[in-house]
Image (cartoon, grey):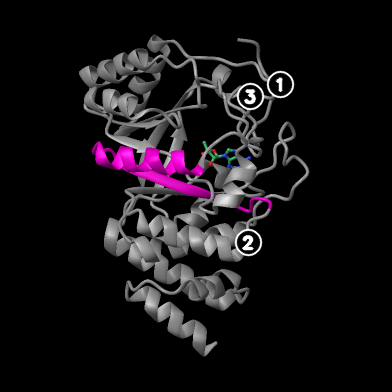
Amino acid sequence: MYEMAKILDVLSDGRLPSRDGLESVLALDDGREARRLFSIADDIRKRHVGEGTLFRGIVEFSSFCGNTCRYCGLNRSNKTLKRYRMPKAGILEAVRDICDSGIGTVVLQSGEDDGLDPLWLKEVIESIKSESDIAVTLCVGEKTRDEYRLWREAGADRYLLKIETSDRALYESLHPGMSYDNRLRCLADLKELGYETGSGIIVGLKGQTVSSLAEDILFLAKWALDMIAIGPFIPHGRTGLSGEAAGDALMTLKVIALTRLVTRKPNIPATTALGEACEDLRFEALRCGANVIMQNFTPERYSLLYDIYPKKRKEAVKAL
Ligand code: 5AD
């Protein structure tokens, strides 16, 4: 009890606790102490990023993916999924809707689409920027430094690339054929090129421990990120992890609160995955450190096919 009060004091003062300290907060199951943690994180959020909640509009413009991430429904082995790429005109229309809603940032998201033409994306970014002064966030995966530079010079402002887990062995077991070092190389390139850079993790992955979550929090702090997305694992039937349990809601909220406390300034979304968990946890997240809501502006005939994880509003998938 006394130990916990000391750790919460360290966090509240903005000092970085030890990994053991983080682990004991993550392990706490005392409701009163968890509420105290959330309330400190909420205060720090207000102090560092203000009272308001920021909104972002997402456009999921391509569901093609060349990777085989073991948790994700877009993995290329999922042959049952019909794939799409939105035409440029459709993307621009969705961006106009975002602007009309008074939202100041569009997140252009896709699977890691090997067929994505970098020059086409450059033109999309330039067209968006010529129509409005909306901020453009890209979330299209691991690419070359030259591609990142091309899009930055075209006007892209921010880039999101989640590390998913900072535990190298776990990372490699969940991402067959991918390289942890290349992921770090991408994050370093993005920062050097002047993107506001975001990363983040999934909570509740098979094989993840409280100790690796504590390392994740230290990793996110060390990288001095501008945005940090933390969401619970949601099992998907067409993946290697289909039979596994979903990520724990309370654990996800504790990771968000601790991340706010050790990083202070970044924008932290109440992730879409939190909205798809057993109950909508996004509003809880906004009271324990998160300050951003992501709203999906992908036309429905596409978003139904953007099947990363099962969504509550699942309907029969319409033909394109
Ligand atoms: N559960 C939770 N999050 C997932 N993502 C992909 N699949 C899942 C899943 N089954 C997240 C990853 C990825 C983002 C686009 O979606 O963190 O970076």
Mark pair 1, 3: CA separation = 21 Å
Image quarter in which the C terminus is found = top right
Residue identified by numbered label 3: 76
Q: Which mark is residue 209?
A: 2
Residue type pointed to by label 2: Thr
In this picture, residue 250 sits left or right of residue 136: right
Residue type pointed to by label 1: Ala
Residue identified by numbered label 1: 316
Which range of residues does the magenta coloring cover? 180-206
Distance from mark 1 CB to nearest ligand 1 atom below 8 Å: no
Confirm whether residue 117 shows in the render.
Answer: yes
In this picture, residue 205 sits left or right of residue 1: right
Image quarter in which the N terminus is found = bottom right
Closer to the observer: label 1 or label 2?
2
Measuring from the top left, give residue 208's x and y in whole percent.
Answer: 63, 56
Residue at left offset 71%, top offset 34%: 239
What is the secondary structure assignment of the residue under circle 1? loop
> Do the residues under discs 1 and 3 have CB atoms within 8 angstroms?
no
Residue at left offset 35%, top offset 53%: 223
Counting residues from the N terminus, which is met first, the one under dot 1 or under dot 2? Answer: 2
In depth, the one of 91 and 147 nearer the eye is: 147
